[in-house]
Amino acid sequence: MNFKLINSISVSLLVARWKQTLVAAIGVTFSITMFIALLSFMSGLNDMLDGLIVNRTPHIRLYNEIQASKNQPIDLSKEYKGHYNFIRSVKPKNERAQIHNCPAMIKALDNDDRVLGYAPKIVAQVFYNVGDIDLTGVINGVNVDEEARLFKFKDYVTAGNYIDLKNIPNSIILGKGAAEKMLANIGDVVQVTTSKGERMQLKVVGYFQSGIQEVDKVQSYASISTAQKLLGESKNYITDIQVKLKDIAWAPKMAKEYANLFDIEAVDIQTANSQFETGSSIRTLISYAVGITLLIVAGFGIYNILNMMIYEKMDSIAILKATGFSGNDVNRIFITIALSIGFFGGGMGLFLGFGLSNIIDNVPFNTASLPTIKTFPINYNPKFYFIGAVFSLVTTYLAGYFPSRKASKIDPVVIIRGK
């Protein structure tokens, strides 16, 4: 078998029908281009939407939930042991939301190699006092440095400087929606009242915008010390510990581990935001389905072109076989043609797909609900380009294989006699 001769014949057939070859290559190029651009854009969109929640959500949240005691006195009675006891209107236990064994928990987190970091937090239900009107709200007392490092807090502060929350006593960063409702400007002083009637005046040092409008209407941020002062609590008062892990996949298992170890409520990010993961998976599946459909359609186009080429080249194939070329040689000729179309068309498609993705990445995308997003999101994952390259070669190979198998079985005597 002379590979050089087979390649020469393949090139001759490609050049002889260059218009059909060009159409087939353009089909592959267009399919790969749209496959890359579509997957890059949809994946970037998924990352953006998930980031609105994931960036601001701990992998594990540790907190003390106030709820009714699971073991009632009657359950501890020997007299009614083994009976089914039905108790109605059970009230929650008389306890506070404070995490009681906070120092031990923090020490355990410091010694756990799986933990990337943690940030203590205080959640305080308050009323914003606007004249004679009280607006409900939530003030989150945070460790400013850790909140910025682990949860990108500074990226969501749209006005003012987030570090002022740490440096200026009795300061607050208002949610954008809450600030608009109160007509509060940076530098103004707002009054808040806790559920226990404690009142405090706080200086506005910035605006916070998460991208979720309903959250921004009630949520604001202060330092932990300010939140403790507002509630009239000691420096040990903490209601939440937000944990970030080195691998988010460990969250469900570690949440159960911490819940059993510390006898506390622990919620992992997968459980808390399962609907977002479902939506992301569905969008990714749709993107792959559409992209692969484009490649398959291009493959059928190449199949039709090669099938027509074989039909028109019956005389040439008969001559090749009559002069000593085997059926496998004919098969290799047309597979070489198909792979050449797939290689050059696919390579150009990858290049144009990257270019189109880059163009989309620079298109301005400004919306008030997403302050951190300035352009359309694009994900330049090399996986997309690898899948596109492999699939272009596979589809063109299959598109060339079936017509070439037909050509390899042609009887030259029948063709020449018919002519």
Image (cartoon, rainbow, N blue to C red):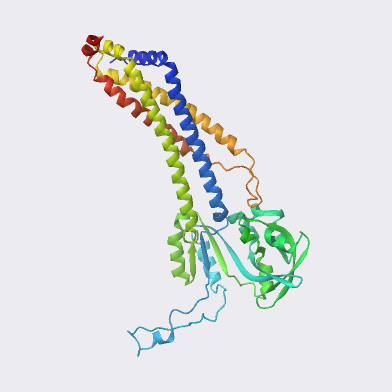
The quarter in which the C terminus is drawn is top left
Tell me where residue 30 appears, x and y as whole percent. 48, 30
Residue 80: x percent and y percent?
A: 35, 88
Q: Where 256 falls versus 293 (above or below)?
A: below
Give the x, y percent position of residue 134. Answer: 70, 71
* Residue at the image point whose x is 59% and y is 56% from the top: 151
Q: Nearer the viewer, residue 128 or 290?
A: 290
Residue at 72%, 54% (x, y): give it.
Answer: 159
| Quadrant occupied by the N terminus | top left
Residue 26's spot in the image, x, y percent? 47, 25
Relative side of 110 to 164, left or right: left
Q: Residue at x 32, y 18 (%)?
A: 311
Query: In the image, is residue 249 above or below residue 310?
Result: below
Write the residue at 75% across / 73% down: 132
Above or below 263: residue 384: above
Q: In which quarter of the view is residue 219 placed?
A: bottom right
Nearer to the camera, 410 or 249? 410
Is residue 344 among what the camera can see?
Answer: no
